[in-house]
Image (cartoon, rainbow, N blue to C red):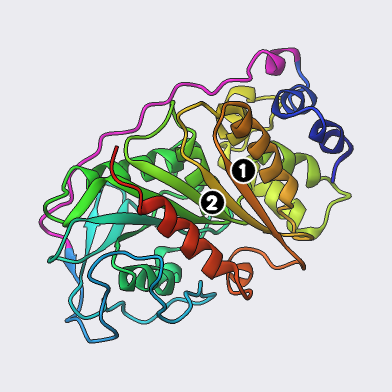
Amino acid sequence: MGTAVRTAMGMGAAALATLMLTSPGARAATSAAAVAPAGNPAPQPSATPVPSASPVSSASATPSGSATPPTPSATASPSASPTPPAGARMHTYSYGPHPRQIMDVWWHPTGPRRPAVFVVHGGWWSGGDKKYMTSVTRYYVQQGYTVVNLDYRLSGDAPWPAQRTDVLSAVAAVRRHPALFNTDPGRYVLLGFSAGGHLAAAVGTYGDGRPGLRGVVGISPPVSPLSAYEDGTAFGTYEQRKLRRAAVRLAGGCSPARCPRVWSSMEVPFHATPHDAPMLAVHSADEFVPPYQSEVLRESLENVGVPMTVKTMAGTFHSAPLYREPGVAETVRAWIAARLAQPAR
């Protein structure tokens, strides 16, 4: 952990901003540049259909925290052509004109309107694909939820905030069509892995609360790109140096000193507001995205009255391997079930 970050841990996000953004112009830029989401086109009727569904196991009639299907697992390799559980449907839709602005929507056409889980893949903001999240997606469909497994523009396609904009747009597209997907637009959560956890948290703190958002879960989320930049100097590990380069690329190739407003916009702890949704973050104690990043975010959220839980596991596993550790997926499932069980406000 860098000296600046160790010092800031005792002083909160404001101190972190002062220490990290060292230029005079940077010190004045501790709030995000206002960037509105791009247009939110409706799912297109030319969506690619899923292959014929094959029975896997029956989905619950209603989402329930007590269901006990097989443990969900995030895979390190893509799944075969996805097939929904018996009784569910899946189609791939475009939510924007770019080839990566697509999402697989899995839903139950019968029964009560279901709350939704949006799954956001990781990959250093520069890679990854929704196909790696198929097993997690299928698991939550089996729990009885509407599940949206989405792709987004990568840092090589467009710089920040395009990635946050894409997640916002995908959420808005599904919420505009509750009857089509038999879903409750007033109840959804975001579940993100690694870089996807950063995007989920960034959406969770965008504005002063998001309509219908009940919670955000991040598995190894790098919610503080400024900390990652500090930790990824020549003295950092290979992964820390790689994460620093990835954060710079996300910022359009610009350093914090040169582009303080962009980096401030990327820094999730800077944007906590009283109506943000509660959050859960899971880290390994010694992974290259250390728990202190989420601890800084927890301090910022709790300062405005929003609860956040940071769960730390022993070891060095990151993202999908961490999710497969005993008890992690079960903890996430129970937390999501509790958040989505609450009635619409």
Point out the image quarter for the C terminus.
top left
Label annotation for residue 197: 2
Residue 204 visible (yes or no): yes
Which quadrant holds residue 208? Answer: top left
Q: Which residue is mark 1?
A: 223
Work out whether mark 1 precedes mark 2 in sequence or the reverse, and give the earlier one.
2
Residue 264, relative to residue 323: is it above or below?
above
The answer to whether the residues at label 1 and label 2 have Cβ atoms under 8 Å apart is: yes
Is residue 195 in the magenta section? no
Q: Is residue 26 left or right of residue 250?
A: right
Residue at figure coordinates x 18%, y 42% from the top left: 176
Element assignment for label 1: loop
Residue 128 visible (yes or no): no
Q: Is residue 167 left or right of residue 271?
A: left
Q: Name which residue type carries label 1.
A: Val
Which quadrant holds residue 344? Answer: top left
Element assignment for label 2: helix
Where in the figure is residue 230, as x and y percent of width and height? Answer: 78, 39
Mark 1: few, some, or many residues within 10 Å (few <14, many ≥20)? Answer: many
Residues shaded magenta: 24-47
